[in-house]
Amino acid sequence: MNKELSSIKAPSKRIPSPSFVKLAMRNMVKKGNQSLFHFGLTAIGFIAFILIIAFIGKPTIPH
């Protein structure tokens, strides 16, 4: 068992993988208009969702 563990060596210098933010930015630049279109759809959908929730939760004031 010790023989097996000693034969496995960890890499001495390891290059850190890029962060998710860097990968997302690179992907957004690469895809261009498609990313902007999806971002616009998401923004419009989120605003519509907030407005619908505000309309449903509106308090009613009796006269």
Image (tube, rainbow, N blue to C red):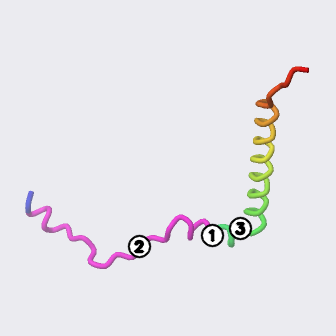
Describe the element under mark 1 as helix, strand or loop: helix
Q: Mark 3 packing: few (<14 Cα in 10 Å), some, or many (20+)? A: few
Contact flag, marks 3 and 2 (Cβ < 8 Å): no
Farthest residue toward the bottom? Answer: 13
Describe the element under mark 2 as helix, strand or loop: loop
N-term-proximal mark, 3 vs 2:
2
Q: CA distance from mark 3 to mark 2?
A: 25 Å
57 sits to left or right of 11: right
Farthest residue toward the left? Answer: 2
Amino acid type indicated by mark 3: Lys
**Nearest the eye: 57 or 28:** 57
Describe the element under mark 3 as helix, strand or loop: helix
37 sits to left or right of 24: right
Q: Mark 1 packing: few (<14 Cα in 10 Å), some, or many (20+)? A: few
Amino acid type indicated by mark 1: Met
Q: Judge whether 17 appears above or below 1 on screen.
A: below
Task: Find the magenta span and give its range.
Answer: 3-25
Q: Mark 2 packing: few (<14 Cα in 10 Å), some, or many (20+)? A: few
Query: Which residue does the numbered mark 3 point to in the structure image?
Result: 31
Contact flag, marks 1 and 3 (Cβ < 8 Å): no
